[in-house]
Image (cartoon, grey):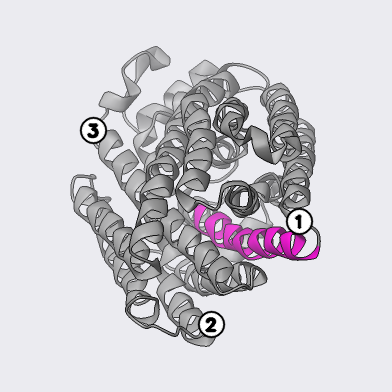
């Protein structure tokens, strides 16, 4: 059962790279909660708070492929340091805005999103350079599973800071975490000798064997078979998850216990973490459509336990629904992420994962205002129903993604 974990442990420099790549993402689950409390406190509207988050994520979506392409062609550490510094500055400016100046917040959020540190795409384009076979598939799953720890720690940290201090402090804390994580990951990449992109000749050879011929990397990346479909899957899947996050925040604020947002988010992430830990031991290629069906079903479980379906909701009941429903999340995200790496040429994986980042942030941007309107007008249960519909759309789109042959993966290490 743990053979693939032993393979991971033998990969040089992997613990440092993986740890810092995760630290560089800790701000991601914390920032939406901090900003939602900040803007909702200014305006009293979740729709406006969702619009500010949408502006932030639109900026990140625009910048994703550009940052990935820069990392494919130059020093990854330089991209991380410059982007991380500018992003932290933008979040700090948002936190320092006076309440009466809230109309400026979407503009500041958009500019901040344009500077989002490209930690996920650089990390995920690095893994194929140091692993292969079953070890690589396991690494993608372990990465997504450990990322769920961030979705436990990040919401708890942000909601706890809001409860103990205020939303401004929580936003500044997110800025500091983003900067520290970017600096740490940049240093780790440099020490591992992975700062510069792989040689074009080596990359072209790997692309030919793993993702099809792409001489010089000049063909249209998005035109490759299945690429648009998998990006659509990622967009709608993350839109569903972002909607549930916003529902959790709104319900907790409505009952006057903002710290519950962090607790419920942590419970949801723990369920996902356990599901990922189990799925990471599988050696057969994952069935993406089946995992998406499980995610859709898991999200739907929360609808009957939320207002207005259930007038007086218990946090224990909601937590139980989130824990059970979260079990499919990490396995599904891991399968979608690995599929992007499989479909992209090796020389352009940074750009491909940049497009993945664009897809996921676009999903958040589309989801936040829609969910905010549903919350303002129909209540939390309607917000979760919209999330389930988005997950069902992702499942339908996955039928257009080419399937890997149903065979056991080779057990090469690196």
Q: Left or right of 141: which side holds 227?
A: left
Q: For marks 3 and 2, give the CA distance.
A: 45 Å
List x then y, in percent, for residue 406: 26, 59
Q: Mark 3, residues whose alpha carbon is within 10 Å: few (<14), some, or many (≥20)?
A: some
Judged from the image, the secondary structure of the residue bearing numbered disc 3 is loop
Mainly helix, strand or loop, the magenta region?
A: helix
- Find the magenta span and give its range: 140-164
Q: Which mark is residue 105?
A: none
Judged from the image, the secondary structure of the residue bearing numbered disc 2 is helix
Q: Does the image show residue 410? A: no
- Measuring 37% from the left and 42% from the top, which residue is drawn there? 366
* Upstream in sequence: badge 3 or badge 2: 3
Q: Does the image show residue 255? A: yes
Judged from the image, the secondary structure of the residue bearing numbered disc 1 is loop
Residue at far front of view: 100
- Measuring 35% from the left and 70% from the top, which residue is drawn there? 381
Q: Which mark is residue 225?
A: 3
Residue position for label 1: 166
Residue position for label 2: 315
Mark 1 near mark 2, Cβ–Cβ under 8 Å?
no
Figure quadrant of residue 395: bottom left
Q: Is residue 389 above or below residue 209?
A: below
């Amino acid at each position: 059962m743990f053979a693939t974990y032993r393979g991971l442990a033998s990969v040089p420099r992997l613990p440092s790279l993986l740890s810092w790549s995760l630290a560089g993402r800790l701000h991601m689950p914390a920032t939406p909660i901090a900003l939602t409390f900040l803007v909702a406190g200014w305006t009293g509207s979740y729709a406006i708070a969702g619009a500010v988050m949408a502006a932030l994520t639109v900026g990140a979506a625009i910048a994703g492929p550009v940052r990935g392409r820069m990392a494919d062609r130059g020093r990854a550490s330089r991209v991380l340091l410059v982007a991380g510094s500018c992003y932290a500055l933008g979040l700090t400016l948002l936190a320092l805005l006076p309440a009466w100046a809230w109309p400026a917040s979407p503009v500041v959020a958009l500019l901040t999103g344009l500077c989002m540190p490209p930690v996920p795409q650089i990390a995920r384009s690095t893994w194929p350079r140091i692993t292969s076979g079953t070890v690589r598939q396991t690494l993608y799953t372990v990465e997504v599973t450990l990322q769920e720890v961030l979705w436990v720690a990040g919401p708890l940290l942000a909601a706890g800071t809001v409860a103990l201090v205020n939303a401004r402090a929580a936003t500044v804390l997110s800025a500091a975490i983003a900067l520290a994580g970017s600096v740490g990951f940049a240093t780790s990449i440099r020490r591992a000798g992975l700062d510069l992109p792989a040689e074009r000749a080596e990359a072209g050879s790997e692309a030919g064997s793993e993702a099809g011929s792409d001489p010089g990397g000049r063909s249209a990346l998005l035109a490759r078979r299945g690429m648009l479909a998998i990006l659509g899957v990622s967009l709608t899947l993350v839109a569903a998850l972002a909607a549930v996050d916003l529902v959790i925040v709104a319900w907790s604020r409505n009952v006057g216990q903002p710290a519950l947002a962090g607790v419920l988010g942590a419970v949801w992430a723990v369920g996902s973490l356990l599901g990922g830990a189990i799925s990471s031991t599988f050696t057969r290629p994952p069935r993406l459509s089946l995992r998406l069906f499980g995610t859709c079903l898991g999200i739907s479980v929360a609808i009957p336990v939320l207002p207005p379906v259930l007038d007086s909701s218990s946090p224990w009941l909601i937590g139980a629904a989130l824990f059970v429903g979260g079990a499919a999340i990490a396995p599904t995200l891991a399968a979608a992420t690995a599929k992007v790496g499989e479909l992209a040429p090796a020389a352009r994986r940074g750009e491909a994962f940049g497009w993945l980042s664009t897809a996921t942030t676009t999903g958040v941007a589309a989801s936040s205002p829609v969910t905010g309107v549903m919350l303002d007008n129909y209540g939390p249960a309607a917000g979760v129903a919209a999330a389930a519909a988005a997950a069902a759309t992702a499942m339908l789109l996955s039928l257009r993604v080419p399937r890997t042959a149903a065979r056991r993966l080779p057990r090469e290490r690196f």
